[in-house]
């Protein structure tokens, strides 16, 4: 009698299918968690991240920081992480961020400087960028020319779980002057970006990056206050393999909208999508995608000194949304005067100006269904925040942010100017915040905090002991209710309160592997 046992093979095959190719694609793990309560969570084995072209300005400087948290029990010799420059298939494509109208100066592909950060290869060449040597210690490099390209990165083995890359750009002059930051994102097929604009005072470019070896076909659709904006050109964009394509949104339509929502969908392939929004008077920043449509939304981390805040909401479904608006401050959640509720029509973008809503205290916006009757409608949302006044204004964006299920990381933090915001919309929660070693050495430091339900805790994150250089901050939810987080980096220059805010969604460092439900053995008798 010959007996062929397939149960172990089947389990190994399922594990390989899930962890062997589990890139951080931004999708939800709720379905996987619900399908198997007894599922085991294992570290992902491969992650992909995409960094958009930072700027074409000759007066810009970009810092890249990469980091993977150190995990107990990981194989010390397994895996690696690095980024490679993407191609720009149209060298004469206009690009935002400069003071010359955004025209590309043809410098893509030139070697840059490493900013004195050691042996890290700077963007602009054909060599790997920011290869990690060990988890738990960030690496960093600088690029001080307009030639920095988009980057395509992969991490595998012990470097994959929680791998994070941050790019932070300072532009000293011109219409795009300011501090522009973004966390490099995982590829996906569907993105919602409320808060874009086709107004004459704005130059909004969506950067589409394709990490794969086959071309991606991408649709771009804009929705304004009265619905879909009429297209003046073909909305289907081809993104060649391992390339990036910037698209100026105002070229897609003749209609002008101060507040609009962009829907990016990939017909074929997968992409990364982020919008660089440049205001002629108020600087600019990156606008990342909103969290997936949800009936309840959290927008964490409004600075205490915000001089104005503009809420942009879109209802992508077939039903209108009626939302209750609350501001979660340091002590409790209140309703902003005059903005108790918001009605959002299906397929239309709604925007409301909240003014200096925080009144000198840090806070977060919470959107929940209004009333108890009928089914709640999912929405996407973002907040445009301004600091400063007059000619000294600076702008940043905070998208609706998913809760931290286990951990999330901001890779680039400095000894001054970093503020971490944590909001618990419902029940109180306990979190642990860990500062990694610095890029120039030191040792990690952890602190534990409690965030009371319905409040925002804004704090200066801990710093590494005896550390030098940029460091990473990791937030772990230990117990209690959901927690949403963001990190603000501030830098004052010539009287302008430059700042950028990065939301901290869960890093998707682990994946649920269902337990075997039955013995799949085959019994063959001779």
Image (spheres, rainbow, N blue to C red):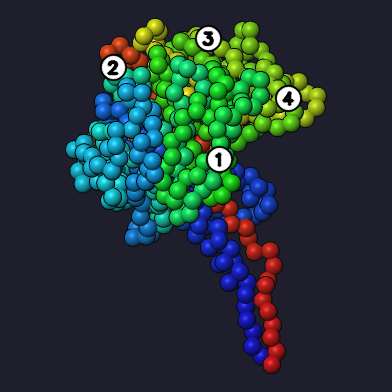
Q: Secondary structure at mark 4?
A: loop
Nearest to the observer: residue 6 or residue 38: 6
Which of the pair 454/105 is nearer the observer?
A: 105
x, y percent for residue 314: 63, 26
Q: Which mark is residue 355?
A: 3
The correct choice, above or below, for 128 with respect to 223 in the image is: below
Q: Secondary structure at mark 1?
A: strand
The numbered disc on residue 86 is none
Residue 493 — which label? 2
Q: Nearer the viewer, mark 1 or mark 3?
A: 1
How many angstroms separate mark 2 from mark 3 (CA)?
A: 24 Å
- Answer with mark 4 or mark 1, whichever residue precedes in sequence: 1
Let me know if residue 195 appears in the view: no
User: Circle 1 is placed at which residue position?
Assistant: 236
Q: Residue at x 45, y 16 (%)?
A: 201
For marks 3 and 4, the one nearer the N-term is 4
Verify CB contact (< 8 Å) between mark 2 and mark 3: no
Determine the secondary structure under disc 3.
Answer: loop
State which tag comes first along the sequence, 4 or 2. Answer: 4
Q: Position of residue 317 (x, y in %)?
A: 70, 32
Label 3 CA crowd tier, 10 Å (few <14, some 14–19, many 20+): some
Kindly report which numbered mark, 4 or 2, lies closer to the viewer in this rendering. Answer: 4
* Quarter of the figure that contains the N terminus: bottom right
Q: Residue at x 80, y 24 (%)?
A: 373
Q: Secondary structure beneath disc 2?
A: strand
Tell which tag, 3 or 4, sits nearer the viewer.
Answer: 4
Which mark identifies residue 320?
4
- Toward the viewer: 90 or 368? 90
295 sits to left or right of 150: right
């Amino acid at each position: 009698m010959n007996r062929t046992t397939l149960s172990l093979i089947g389990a190994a095959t399922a594990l390989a299918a899930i962890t062997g190719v589990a890139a951080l694609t931004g999708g939800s793990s709720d379905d996987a968690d619900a399908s198997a309560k007894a599922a085991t969570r294992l570290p992902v084995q491969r992650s992909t991240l995409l960094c958009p072209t930072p700027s074409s300005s000759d007066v810009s400087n970009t810092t890249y920081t990469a980091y993977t948290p150190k995990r107990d029990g990981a194989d010390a010799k397994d895996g690696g992480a690095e980024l490679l420059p993407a191609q720009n298939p149209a060298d004469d494509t206009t690009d935002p961020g400069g003071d010359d109208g955004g025209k590309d100066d043809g410098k893509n592909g030139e070697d840059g400087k490493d900013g004195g950060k050691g042996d890290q290869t700077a963007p602009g060449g054909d060599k790997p960028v920011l290869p990690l040597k060990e988890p738990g210690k960030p690496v960093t490099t600088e690029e001080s020319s307009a030639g920095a390209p988009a980057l395509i990165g992969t991490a595998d083995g012990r470097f994959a779980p929680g791998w994070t890359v941050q790019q932070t750009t300072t532009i000293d002059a011109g219409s795009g002057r300011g501090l522009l930051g973004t966390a490099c994102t995982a590829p996906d097929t569907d993105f919602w970006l409320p808060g874009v604009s086709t107004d004459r005072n704005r130059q909004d470019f969506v950067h589409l990056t394709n990490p794969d070896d086959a071309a991606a076909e991408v649709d771009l659709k804009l929705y304004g206050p009265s619905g879909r904006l009429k297209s003046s050109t073909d909305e289907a964009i081809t993104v060649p393999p391992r390339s990036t394509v910037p698209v100026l949104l105002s070229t897609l339509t003749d209609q002008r909208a101060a507040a609009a929502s962009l829907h990016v969908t990939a017909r074929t392939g997968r992409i990364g999508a982020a919008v660089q929004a440049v205001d002629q008077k108020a600087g600019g920043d990156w606008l990342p995608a909103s969290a997936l449509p949800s009936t309840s939304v959290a927008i964490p981390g409004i600075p205490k000194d915000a001089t104005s805040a503009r809420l942009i909401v879109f209802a992508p479904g077939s039903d209108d949304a009626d939302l209750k608006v609350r501001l979660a401050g340091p002590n409790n959640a209140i309703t902003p005067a005059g903005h108790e509720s918001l009605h959002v029509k299906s397929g239309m973008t709604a925007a409301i100006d909240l003014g200096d809503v925080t009144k000198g205290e840090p806070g977060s916006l919470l959107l929940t269904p209004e009333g108890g009757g009928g089914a709640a409608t999912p929405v996407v949302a973002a907040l445009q925040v301004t600091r400063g006044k007059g000619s000294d204004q600076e702008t940043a964006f905070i998208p609706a942010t998913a809760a931290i299920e286990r951990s999330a990381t901001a890779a680039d933090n400095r000894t001054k100017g970093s503020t971490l915001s944590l909001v618990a919309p419902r029940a109180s929660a306990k979190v642990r915040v860990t500062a990694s070693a610095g890029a120039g050495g030191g040792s990690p430091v952890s602190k534990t905090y409690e965030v009371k339900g319905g409040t925002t805790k804004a704090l200066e994150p801990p710093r590494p002991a005896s550390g030098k250089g940029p460091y990473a901050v990791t937030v772990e939810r230990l117990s209690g209710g959901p927690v949403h987080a963001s990190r603000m980096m501030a830098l004052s220059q010539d009287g302008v309160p430059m700042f950028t805010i990065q939301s901290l969604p869960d890093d998707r460092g682990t994946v649920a592997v269902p337990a075997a439900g039955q013995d799949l053995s085959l019994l063959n008798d001779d």
